[in-house]
Amino acid sequence: MTPLLRACRGLPKRELAAGDVLMAEGQQMTALFVVVSGSFVVTRGSSVVASVEEPGAVLGETAFLLGTAHRATVTATAPGVVHVVSDIEEFIGDDNERVLEIARILARRLDRLSTYLGDVRSQYSDAGGHLELLDEVLAELAFGQQPEADPGSARDPDPLY
Amino acid sequence: MMKMLLVSDLHYALPHFDWVLDRASEFDAVVLAGDHLDVSSLVPLESQIVAVRTYIRKIAEVTRVVVCSGNHDLTARNGHDEKHAPWLEGIDHAGVFGDWQSLDTSGARVSVCPWWDGPATRDDVGRKLADDGIGRPARWVWIYHFPPDGVPVSWIGSRHVGDSDLNAWIDAHQPDLVLSGHIHDAPFRDDGSWISKIGSSWVINVGRSAGPIPAHAIIDLAGGTATWWSAHGTDEQTLWPIRQQNQG
C-alpha cells in the first residue's frame, strides 16, 4: 500500500463502472481522487494522453490545488474505486507526511516531464523551430517564478479578437 | 530608414513565431502588433509568456523588435487599477522596444502604444503620443493593436469594430503610419481591407490567416511601399513618394 493510500484510510470512496466519467475537461474541480483499484483513461479533446492503473495514483490534483477547471477528462475503463478528497485542508490537517507525499508526486511528475523534454531538445538539436528554444523555455519554467497572470480585458472581453 | 516586417495576432501559434524568427534577420525591425498570447489556449498564460519572451529575445539577437500589447496579453492591473501587460513594459533588453517605449532611428520614430483597458491608461496613451510628436522626424509610425473605427481595416463583415479614440489621435497628430491588428478577418471580408487611409495617415492590419506562414506585411519606409501577404492573397500599396536625397 502506498503512503498516500494509507493516508486516505477512512475517507469516502466512490465506485465506478466501466465508462463512468470521473471528471470532465473544462469542468470546475470538485475533489481530488486517489485510485484504490480499477483502470482509467485520461483524454484531452479526442486524444488519449495517459492511462492510469496503479493504486495510489492521484487524479485531478492540478485543478484541485490551483482551483482551476480540469484540463482533461478521466474515464473509468474497468470497474474501480477511488477515494474522494473534497477538502484538502481537512485532509492534510497536521499530517506533514500527507503534504510531503503529494509534493513528491508532483515533483516526480515535473522531473520526468522536464528531463524528457530536455532530452528531446538535445536529441533534436539541429531540428530548428521551437525545439531550439526548448532548453531556455524549460529552464525558465522549471526554475523561474512566474507571477500569476490575471487574464482578459475589461474593455474587450471577446476572446475571439 | 527602416524596412520592417509586421505581424500581429499570432495568438501563441508557435510555428508562426518560428517563421518570424527565421525571417527576422532580413529586416531592420520586426513589429509584433499585439495578441502574442491566447487566453483560450490550454497552455497557461504564465507559460505562454515565457515562450513568447524567449522568441522576442531570439529575434532581438538578429534585429530590433518592436512589440506592443493586445487584449490577450493583459496579465495584471496597473496603478490605475486597469489591466495591462507588465511583461511587455520597461523592457531592458538591447534591441527590444515594448509598451510605452519609442524607437528613434534614421529619419523615423516608432511609438509603441500599449492596449489601454480603462480611461486613465487611455489618457496616458494620449499624453505619450503628444510627447512623442514633439520634434517628429520625417516618418512617424505608431504601433497600436486596436485599429481605428469606421475604416476597412476594422470591418468585421457587418459593421466596423474599431477604436474611436485612436481616430481622434490620428486626426490630431496625423502620423504617417499606424500598424495594428485585432480584427482578424478585416482583410478577408468584402468591403474590408488590410490597409486604409485616414487623412494623410495610413493604417495597416495584416489580419490572421491559417497555414504555416502568418499573414504579414513588409514595409519599406524609405521606399514608401507596403507589401501584404496572406494565405488568401497578396497586395502592394505605395505609401508615399520616395524622397530625393541631397536636394538643392
Image (cartoon, rainbow, N blue to C red):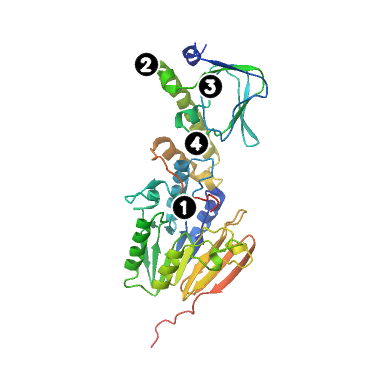
Asked whether disc 1 touches disc 3, contact meaning CB atoms under 8 Å apart, the reply is: no
Percent across and percent down for residue B71 are 46, 52
Q: Which residue is mark 1?
A: B71
Dot placed on the residue nearer the N-terminal end, 2 or 4: 2
Q: Are marks 1 and 3 on the same chain?
A: no
User: Based on the displayed image, in which of its 4 quarters is residue B138 positioned?
Assistant: bottom left
Mark 4 vs mark 1, foreground winner is: 1
Dot placed on the residue nearer the N-terminal end, 2 or 3: 3
Q: Amino acid at mark 3?
A: Phe
Q: Are marks 2 and 3 on the same chain?
A: yes
Percent across and percent down for residue A149 are 42, 42
Mark 3 vs mark 4, foreground winner is: 3
Chain for numbered disc 3: A
Residue shown at 49%/71% (left/top)?
Answer: B202
Asked whether disc 4 touches disc 1, contact meaning CB atoms under 8 Å apart, the reply is: no
Q: Which residue is mark 3?
A: A33
Q: Are marks 3 and 4 on the same chain?
A: yes
**In the visual, does B77 lie left or right of B145?**
left
Real-space Cα separation, disc 2 to disc 3, in angstroms: 20 Å
Asked whether disc 2 touches disc 3, contact meaning CB atoms under 8 Å apart, the reply is: no
Q: Secondary structure at mark 4?
A: helix
Residue shown at 48%/60% (left/top)?
Answer: B146
Q: Which residue is mark 4?
A: A118
Real-space Cα separation, disc 4 to disc 1, in angstroms: 32 Å
Q: Amino acid at mark 1?
A: Asn
Q: Secondary structure at mark 1?
A: helix
Real-space Cα separation, disc 2 to disc 4, in angstroms: 37 Å
Q: Which residue is mark 2?
A: A94
In the rendered image, which quarter contains the N terminus of chain B? Answer: bottom left
On screen, A88 above or below B38? above
Percent across and percent down for residue A140 are 42, 40
